[in-house]
Structure formats: C-alpha cells, structure tokens
Amino acid sequence: MASLLAFLFTLSVIAQNDVTQFLGIPVDGSKSEVITKLKSKGFKATSLNNDILEGEFNGNNVYVNIFTNGDKVCRIVATDAVSVDERSIQIRFNNLLRQFENNSKYLTIGDNTSINSDEDLSYEINVHKKRYEANFYQRPVKMADKENWQNIVMARMIEMFATTITEKYTEEDLANPTKELIDDYDNMMVKAAIDILSKKHVWFMISNYAGKYYISLFYDNEYNRADGEDL
C-alpha cells in the first residue's frame, strides 16, 4: 500500500503542474515572472502602477491585474479599460458567454444564462443586488490522454481519501474487490475528477461604476489560492 500511495502521489504532483493559463501563460510562479511573460505578449505597464498592465485581449483593451497568495500567483484578472452603456454590456456579456461555450478548452460550471434584451440591469443590480456572471472550467491538458488522465484522477483520489482507503481496505481487498468496494471507489473517483477540474476556474462578471458598465474576467489557479492554512 505504501509504494502504491507514493506512486500515485507523484502523479498528483503532475496534475498540479497542469494549471490555469491566461494567453498560454500559467497562472503560477512569481508575480515578476508573470509580468515579464505578459510584456512579451505586448502588454505594457500603466502610467500609474507598474504592476498593472494594459493591452489587448480578445479584441478589447483591458487592464490586467495579478494577484498572489504568498509568493505565488493565484489569479489574473482582465478588466475592460472602457466602460459602456447598459445595452452594450448586455450584448458583450452574451457574446462572451457564447464564445466560452463554443470553445473546446472549457467546460461549463452550473447554469450559465444569457441576459434578455429587455432586462433592466441597473434595477436588478442596484435594487435586487443581482450578480451577472458565468463560470467555466478550463479543461486539463492531460484530459486528451485518456490513460494519463485516469492516472491523475486516481492519484488525486488517493490524496483526498488516503486515510479512508487505508482504514477501510487492505491490499487483499483491493486485489479482490467486492461490489461495495467498487461502488465506493467509483464515487471517490468522481469526486476526485470534479476536484481536479475545479482547480482551473475561469469566470467573468459585470460591474458598474457611475452608471457605466464593464466586464472583468478571472483566471484562477485554485492550487495556489488560500485555503485556511494561515488561520
């Protein structure tokens, strides 16, 4: 059992190297490293803050902010540099939603819905405090390789449920699985697969300021996000 756990832990480390990307740049490493890579893509520092970059992304001028947890980048945010009126942001939101849904690099999280043309965004945001957002998973690169993907999911399952497995099952049980063990194993595999997918969260939302609207896109590396370790 110990050798098996060690082998699968190695695979889990491989899974953690498959992180969220922004323009092909991993949302990982130090802030200075990411800034250098973004500048190589044509982004430039703004006049007010060298850590905030400006450039073109998906056909729009955006400001790019980089957030860290400790010394590791955990989030890149691309925010529209030019705000627009209510009707224009409704069209932009729906177009962006369609682009993500038609992009094979992403899987949908939950129920993402477009905005009706007759919806009063100002009223819904200011009175009902409604959030207009859409959520996606960036597909793991290793998913294309079925065997490798299965190994990574298995490794994550072991990492998540190591204590459960070692307390409930012996090497002999694993070699001669009962239906109960197989069902238990399948449930743990599903939870591990969902956990891996959730680490590459990409989402966007509408914000407003002084009666104008803009969209921010968030590229999150959940492996690097705070998870209570400092509490």
Image (cartoon, rainbow, N blue to C red):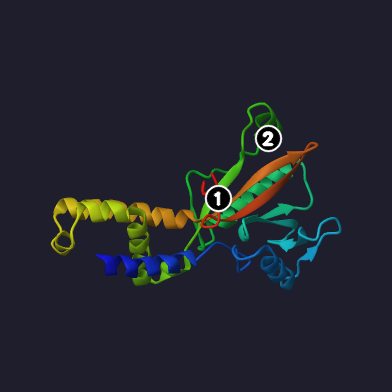
Task: Tell me which corner region of the image, top left, top right, bottom left or bottom right, holds residue 189.
Answer: bottom left
Q: Secondary structure at mark 1?
A: loop
Residue depicted at 62% across the width and 40% down the height: 132
Q: Secondary structure at mark 2?
A: helix
63 left or right of 26? right
How many callouts does the rendering have?
Answer: 2
Regarding residue 86, the answer to whether it shows in the image is: no
Crowding near pointer 1: few (<14 within 10 Å), some, many (20+)? few
Towards the viewer: 185 or 31? 31
In the rendering, at what x and y percent does residue 105 appear? 51, 63
Numbered badge on residue 138: none
In the rendering, at what x and y percent does residue 81 appear? 78, 53
Residue depicted at 77% across the width and 45% down the height: 84
> What amino acid does circle 1 point to?
Ala
Residue at image mark 1: 226
In the rendering, at what x and y percent does residue 69 appear? 61, 54
> What amino acid does circle 2 point to?
Leu
Q: CA distance from mark 1 to mark 2?
A: 33 Å
In the rendering, at what x and y percent does residue 220 appear? 58, 55
Towards the viewer: 171 or 107? 171
| The N terminus: image quadrant | bottom left
Q: Is residue 133 above or below residue 125?
A: below
Regarding residue 130, the answer to whether it shows in the image is: yes
Task: Tell me which corner region of the image, top left, top right, bottom left or bottom right, holds residue 46.
Answer: bottom right
Towards the viewer: 6 or 217? 6
Mark 1 / mark 2, whichever is N-terminal: 2
| The C terminus: image quadrant | top right
Numbered badge on residue 121: 2
Tell us which disc is closer to us: 1 or 2. Answer: 1
Q: Is residue 84 above or below residue 41?
A: above
Residue placed furthest toward the right? 47
